[in-house]
Amino acid sequence: MFLSVPDHRGFCFTQAFQSIGLGLATALGAALAHPGRTPVAACGDGGFLMGMAELDTIRRLGLGMLIVIYNDEAYGAEVHHFGPGGDPLDTVVFPETDLAAIARGHGCEAVTVRSVDDLGPVRGWLAGPREVPMVIDAKVTRDRPSWWLEEAFQGH
């Protein structure tokens, strides 16, 4: 919602495949296709966990990529699609996971963000040489879906 892109080649929406876990791989491809740009991957925590093996490739290639993980401790789309109908959600929610620690284990810079005040390390990374990826583990609520997901589920 608050991200912008420079032109039509600056945006890839992997949800068009109706699959999760493709965000990092897509961002990696975009980074290699346009090496003069700073790639930004916006992933859900479930999708990130599915595709986090790509962190090794991203780090090994020295891609200065910004990876934002919207961490609601669940497969959020499933929570918002099936929860209102009363379906059990025990298989689509999971315990808190320190995704920043996992990213640091891969050699990335990483920060957990719960408020705007936590973004200081990101500002430093943006100002620096960006020789390694920066991962933002953004803790978000699952009380309400994103605007586009809410719109997509109308009438389902």
Image (cartoon, rainbow, N blue to C red):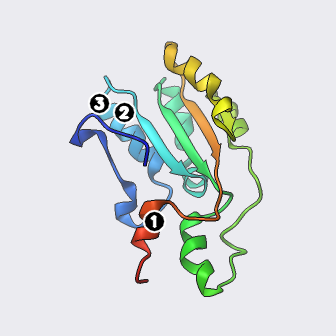
Of callouts 3 and 1, the N-terminal one: 3
Instruction: Looking at the picture, tell me which residue is in the foreground, 37 or 139.
Output: 139
- The residue indicated by pointer 3 is 34
Residue 151 point in image, percent of width and height: 41, 69
The quadrant the C terminus occupies is bottom left
Of callouts 2 and 1, the N-terminal one: 2
- The residue indicated by pointer 1 is 149
The residue lying at 68 percent from left, 43 percent from top is 99
| Distance (Cα) linking label 3 and label 1 | 28 Å
* Helix, strand or loop status at disc 1: helix
Residue 130 seen in the figure: no
Q: Disc 3 marks which amino acid?
A: His
| Distance (Cα) linking label 2 and label 1 | 26 Å
Looking at the image, residue 9 lies above or below residue 124: below
Residue 83 point in image, percent of width and height: 62, 79
Neighbour tally class for label 3: few under 14, some 14-19, many 20 plus, Cα within 10 Å: few
